[in-house]
Image: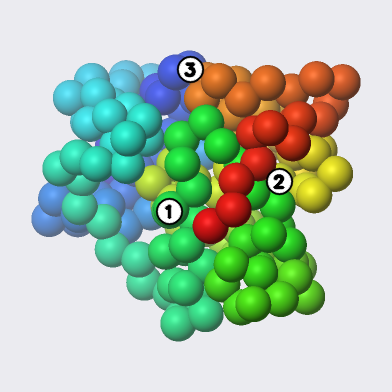
Amino acid sequence: MVCVNLFGIPLEVYIENGVILKIDFVERCSKSNKLFENELKSYWKNGQGALKYVLDVNSNLALVYRKTAEIPFGRVISYGGLSEAIFGTKKYARFIGYAMKKNPLPIIIPCHRVVRSDGTIGGFGGGVKTKGKLLSLEGVQIKNGRIPKSYFTDL
């Protein structure tokens, strides 16, 4: 396990043989691994880097996580929009929410970029405040509790 402070957001990263297995949000990190922290920041910003990870989930969740990984830095998509991009219909928006809640690799699979269709940010495993901070760090503005439609993207 490696402790990382990603822009003041403490994370525990579980690694085996150089491969990331899981990431958890925690209250605090006693000592951050700066080398790994820099690699994670780089990956978070541009979706590229030397990070290796395993996504050990069923096929429907894997579909959701692969598509979620395509959401560009600084953009968001609604739960229904992501459902439509994957399944051709918005009716699986609740399943998308379930998948985001179960995401074993937040930051790598950027579930914080999936929000409600009305522009409110919705829930997040690391807490709503953390989700808002991650979006703000990406340049997404939240005005009166909502994200303007100009930040929404289609996949």
Q: Which residue is mark 1?
A: 69
| Badge number at residue 115 | 2
Residue count near mark 2 (Cα–Cα under 10 Å), binned few <14, some 14–19, many ≥20: many
Residue ID at (81%, 30%): 146
Q: Which residue is mark 3?
A: 8
* Quarter occupied by residue 59: bottom left
Q: Secondary structure at mark 1?
A: loop
- The location of residue 52, given as percent across then percent down, is 20, 52
Q: Residues within 10 Å of mark 3 (few under 14, many from 20)?
A: few
Residue 114 showing in the rendered view = no
Looking at the rendered structure, the kind of residue marked 1 is Ala
Separation of disc 2 and disc 3 at Cα? 22 Å
Residue type at tag 2: Val
Q: Position of residue 136 (x, y in %)?
A: 60, 21
Q: Nearer the viewer, mark 2 or mark 3?
A: 2
Q: Position of residue 28 (x, y in %)?
A: 49, 24
